[in-house]
Image: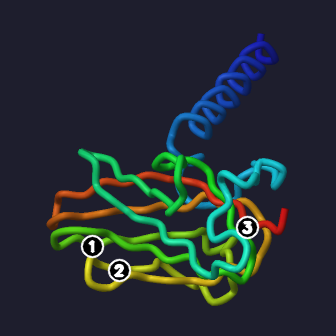
Amino acid sequence: MRLTVAVQTRNALNLAFCILITGSGLAQGPGPCSDPPTLCISTNRCAPGTATTCTVTLAKNGGSATATPDLAGVSANNLFCLAPNKVLKFKTVGGSKTFIVTFSASHPPSPSVTGPLRGSSSNPVSITPTVKACYKYSIEVCESPGSCGSTDPKIIISDE
């Protein structure tokens, strides 16, 4: 009887832990992603060829946010690619907006990215990713205090 109760208790705790990990939002937010560089094709590569800067426009959309690279045909929040050592510029347009872009502290796209990137409509922010990998990053765009939206898009830094 004691063995059965102990096994049932352990199974219940394991199930609760699995639910906590998969449903609590721990999988959300910045960090590495597993999308392979083979997903990088000419139609989703930002700043191709001799271009040096990829501009990503951030916007608030209701309770969420969007990140749209300057690529024809790439929708907001879709995966896009950038070659290492090219400039990745984040900006907002119109009005008085502020934004925060956050990459994982343990998985930054460049050693120079040590914390959240803060910008505004009048102050775009740029970084130069150097580390080839897939990144999930968080953005938050605010139109006024308390009126913010957020999302967690992905980017692949790759030569492919």
The picture places residue 88, in percent across and down from the top left corner, at 56, 76
Asked if the residues shown at circle 1 and circle 2 are in contact, with their CB atoms under 8 angstroms apart, the answer is yes
Mark number displayed over residue 119:
2
Left or right, 76 with respect to 81, comes to left
> Between marks 1 and 2, how big is the CA–CA gap?
6 Å
Q: Which residue is mark 1?
A: 98
The picture places residue 107, in percent across and down from the top left corner, at 69, 70
Mark 3 or 1: the one toward you: 3
Left or right, 44 with respect to 74, comes to right
Mark number displayed over residue 56:
none
Instruction: Looking at the picture, tell me which residue is in the foreground, 54 or 31.
Output: 54
Which of pointers 3 and 1 lies earlier in the amino acid sequence?
A: 1
Instruction: Looking at the picture, tell me which residue is in the foreground, 118 or 8.
Output: 118
Rendered-image quadrant of the N terminus: top right
Left or right, 154 with respect to 146, comes to right
Residue at the spot 55% in from the left edge and 47% down from the top edge? 78
Residue at the spot 57% in from the left edge and 37% down from the top edge? 20
Asked if the residues shown at circle 3 and circle 1 are in contact, with their CB atoms under 8 angstroms apart, the answer is no
Task: Name which quarter of the figure residue 85 lies in.
Answer: bottom right
Rendered-image quadrant of the C terminus: bottom right
Callout 2 secondary element: strand
Q: Which residue is mark 3?
A: 157
